[in-house]
Image (tube, rainbow, N blue to C red):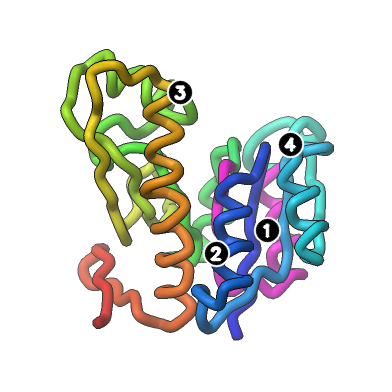
Amino acid sequence: MKNIVVLVSGGGTNLQALIDAQNSGAIKGGHISCVISSKEGAYALERAKKAGIPTVVIPRKNYPDKVSYSMALLEELKKQQADLIVLAGFMTILDRCLTSEYPFKIINVHPALIPAFCGDGFYGIKVHEKVLEYGVKVSGATIHFVNEFTDAGAIILQGVVEIKNDDTPEILQKRIMEQVEWKLLPKAVSLFCQDRITIKDGKAYIDL
């Protein structure tokens, strides 16, 4: 049974999707062993506590740069014996000192179809604002591994939604979360925990 450590910063809706999937038996081969927050008082911590999941707070504001913060996180992840790390609305960029310790063992959800609308500066509602500004006809979410470059790790799963004429960034964000993120993130986690993701030439393949 693999130890899944979830990193959060805010409300924790993706964490809740993982908790619900775990409770329903949809996540096979692993369990959420700890939730780590970069902010004190994040509602995601309440979600974890209600589910009986241990929590740790490592405030980003207490560290001068991403290297020192990543080192503190790394120490805690090793203490927690993390087999898989899931970034669920985690709003801090991780330094290479951490990502290099967990190659193809850190999963993130990005609210667009990588390689479009991704990279530095593309996060949260900003992604959906840019999508609508550009006028594309579909968007979605990408579940991918994390490496030292922003949104550049191997893609595991992607899902698509149609964009409607009267969409606002907030409406589009909600549709993508409900129809793609909350479904595909638990699926990707389960696939990892069942050892059903194979890496070849830096790309992720799902073993059927």
Q: Where is residue 106 in the image (x, y as percent from the top left)?
A: 50, 60
| Labelled pair 2, 1 in contact (Cβ < 8 Å) | yes
Q: Nearer the viewer, mark 3 or mark 4?
A: 3
> How many other residues sit within 10 Å of disc 4, few (<14), some (14-19) or many (≥20)?
many
Is residue 202 positioned above or below 28 on the image? above
Residue 170 numbered tag: 3
| Labelled pair 3, 2 in contact (Cβ < 8 Å) | no
Q: Is residue 185 magenta?
A: no
Q: Position of residue 58 (x, y in %)?
A: 79, 46
Q: Residue at x 72, y 41 (%)?
A: 38
Q: What residue type is labelled 2?
A: Glu
Is residue 69 found left or right of 18 in the rendered image?
right
Q: Nearer the viewer, residue 74 or 82?
A: 82
Q: Which residue is drawn at 24% across and 71% down?
A: 205
Q: Tell me where residue 16 sits by quadrant.
A: bottom right
Q: Which of 9 and 183 is in front in this view?
A: 183
Q: Nearer the viewer, mark 1 or mark 4?
A: 4
Q: Which amino acid does label 3 sit on?
A: Glu
Is residue 135 found left or right of 107 in the rendered image?
left
Residue 74 numbered tag: 1
Residue under numbered circle 4: 60
Query: Is residue 156 at least partly visible in the picture?
Result: yes
Q: Which amino acid does label 1 sit on?
A: Leu
Q: Which amino acid does label 4 sit on?
A: Arg
Tell me where the magenta segment starts and ends, as one range: 69-89
State how far apart marks 3 and 2 are (Cα): 36 Å
State how far apart marks 2 and 1 are (Cα): 8 Å
Helix, strand or loop at label 2? It is loop
Residue under numbered circle 2: 101
Q: Which of 117 and 42 is in front in this view?
A: 42
